[in-house]
Image: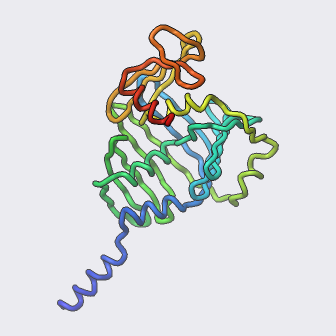
Amino acid sequence: MKQFLIVFLVAVTSFAITVSGVIKRWENSQYIAYRFFVEESKSPKMRYEKVYKKGEDKLVFVINPKNLVWVRMGDKCWMGNKILYLVPSGIKDLEDVALESLKESTDATIVEGAGWYMIEYETKKGYFKVDIDEEGIPINIYRRIDGIEMKMDIEPVVEDLKGFRKLLGDRELSNKLAFPEELGNVFKIFDWFTMSEEGDKIFINGIIGEKWHIVEVAFRKFRGCVKYGNICVKSDPEVLKLLESHSN
């Protein structure tokens, strides 16, 4: 009986998945799916989209609330409709942020079900709960950061995964930037943000390292701003120091 228990425990241990195992499967997963995304915040959002994922490369057709396409291939990312422009900051959806945060996590716990895993973890980017199947395809993703809640439901479909260039059809991948690189640097320092426009100014309000910050951006000088490459920005010293480090 004792020998049987030892064999049983060894077998269970050998089949138990680790966090690094989930990360590897998730990173390398390939799938086609419809996704429904909801964000509950002061500026609530909803999106319905179709996604094609090949490892780290991703092609997303946003169906609702408006038609938009974005694609990531290698280290480049484009966004647009008929013409897709280079996005200097890259694009990270909730899945990308959740995976990135799992890599940074030190307290992730895994509950194993029949053909799926539930992972819970928390980092400076918030609290995450992810259900993912054995192939590394997420079923649903939940994120909470300072009272803001995001949910994404993923419904895989059976369809041949073609090359992204073919799926893009006659859409053009332009070498022109969608917006200045300096504005992309502003976006990248936030863990979460919302954006609004007032006149010729852009107001970015969001979370950086668990603190709220506001950045005002314009393409001309205005009171209290500093010149940052091809744009002018106004914010607190902490944000300006971060932007300075990005420009070096």
Left or right, 163 with reference to 18? right
Total numbered circles: 0
**Residue projecting furthest to the top:** 223
Image coordinates for residue 74, horizontal then vertical, percent: 63, 53
Q: Is residue 25 above or below residue 164?
A: below
Choose between 233 and 194: the one closer to the eye: 233
Image coordinates for residue 29, horizontal then vertical, percent: 55, 61
Q: What residue appears at the point 51 percent right and 39 percent down from the top-left corner?
A: 37
Question: Looking at the rendering, which quadrant does residue 16 occupy?
Answer: bottom left
Choose between 97 and 133: the one closer to the eye: 97
Image coordinates for residue 232, horizontal then vertical, percent: 53, 18
Left or right, 81 with reference to 239? right
Choose between 241 and 146: the one closer to the eye: 241
**Residue projecting furthest to the right:** 170
Image coordinates for residue 122, horizontal then vertical, percent: 31, 46
Q: What residue appears at the point 45 percent right and 17 percent down from the top-left corner?
A: 234
Q: Quadrant of the N terminus?
A: bottom left
Task: State how the image is colored.
Answer: rainbow
Q: What residue appears at the point 49 percent right and 59 percent down from the top-left corner?
A: 26
Q: What residue appears at the point 57 percent right and 9 percent down from the top-left corner?
A: 199
**Residue projecting furthest to the left:** 2
Choose between 116 and 218: the one closer to the eye: 218
Q: Is residue 221 above or below residue 75?
A: above
